[in-house]
Amino acid sequence: MIIDAHAHLWKKQNGIVNGKPVFYIGGGKSNFGGEIKQMMPPYMTDGENTAERFLANMDYAGVSGAVITQEYIDGNQDEYLLTCKSDRIKICALYEEKPLGDISSFDGIKICAGRLNDKNLLNHIEPFKVANENGKIISIDLADGNEQTEMMQKIIEMFPNLRIAIGHFGMVTRENWLEQIKLAKNKNVFIESGGITWLFNDEFYPYPSAVKAINEVADFVGFDKLMWGSDYPRTMTAITYKMSLDFIEKTSEITEENKKLILGENARGFYGFSDLSIPQKIKNMVED
């Protein structure tokens, strides 16, 4: 059972970065605050990163379920994500430094903490309070290193029963990254690896240093606190969706039991997935 704990979807990209617009210009490329970036695979020629395309990738890679998180650089996708929710797809509403609307139909709240105008998390208690009162999860990408970890620890202590997923594997290639990982020593705090292949992109597949980092983190908090995430579709500009989990599936440096935990079992319990099935394996054209 494989579950993706960190993916993105959008109908139309209408984002912002450093106060400048982010928008699609064709061929999978976007104007990223004045710089042209390949933000989607080039075959996504209409600029739509839809659930249908994602589900096809999930089926091919053998992924049963996924959690859709959000990012300011894509723009608020709450309205579109409400049409995507299903037994296989859970969705997070986007916190935008203003009062939240009705989140009753969402499974969680996404906080892009590293992109907040006011990076003092103690000034953003509302999303944590709302999630705690309504049984939702918090998906949060913290600023690099330990800039926000002390504040985050105080919030965790305020809401000890709140389920919190720390994204981007603690920004593993940045200085003081283990300070984010240590937050998972708290009962209901988990670490998800969305973006880990981006952070180790210079090394590239099969990412031996990423595997080493996974084992290092497990030594700190245990494999039962780790969840795999793909960061689809951004990381698919360099690799295939299957490759984003294949480097974990094929490594001999992680036991089969621990692979099951990180690739799906932990996420199934943390996010509350039920009634998932394993997609049928279909041979591709280059397989015998």
Image: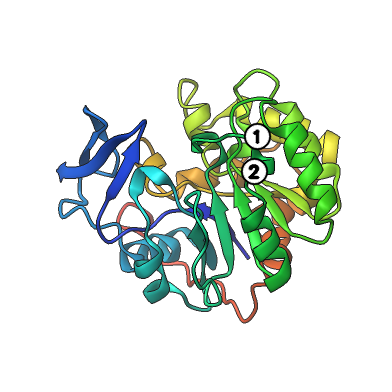
Residue 256 x %, y %: 74, 51
- Quarter of the image holding residue 50? bottom left
Asked if residue 18 lies left or right of residue 265, the reply is: left
Give the labeled residue for mark 1: 170
Q: Label 2 neighbourhood size at 10 Å, few (<14), some (14-19), many (20+)?
A: few
Please name the amino acid that badge 1 sits on: Gly
- Which quadrant: the C terminus? bottom left
- Kindly report which numbered mark, 1 or 2, lies closer to the viewer in this rendering: 2
Q: Is residue 241 above or below residue 64?
A: above
Residue 11 x %, y %: 27, 61
User: Which of the pair 37/41 is nearer the observer?
Assistant: 37
Residue depicted at 41% across the width and 65% down the height: 78
Seen from this angle, which residue lies furthest bottom?
275
Residue 79 in view, yes or no: yes
Please name the amino acid that badge 2 sits on: Asn
Q: Secondary structure at mark 2?
A: helix
Residue 171 x %, y %: 60, 30
- Quarter of the image holding residue 72? top left
Q: Secondary structure at mark 1?
A: helix
Label drawn at residue 123: 2
- Quarter of the image holding residue 65? bottom right
- The mark nearer the N terminus, 1 or 2, is 2
- Which quadrant: the N terminus? bottom right
Give yes or no for contact between labels 1 and 2 (Cβ–Cβ under 8 Å): no
Residue 63 in view, yes or no: no
User: Which of the pair 120/69 is nearer the observer?
Assistant: 120
User: Which of the pair 208/68 is nearer the observer?
Assistant: 68
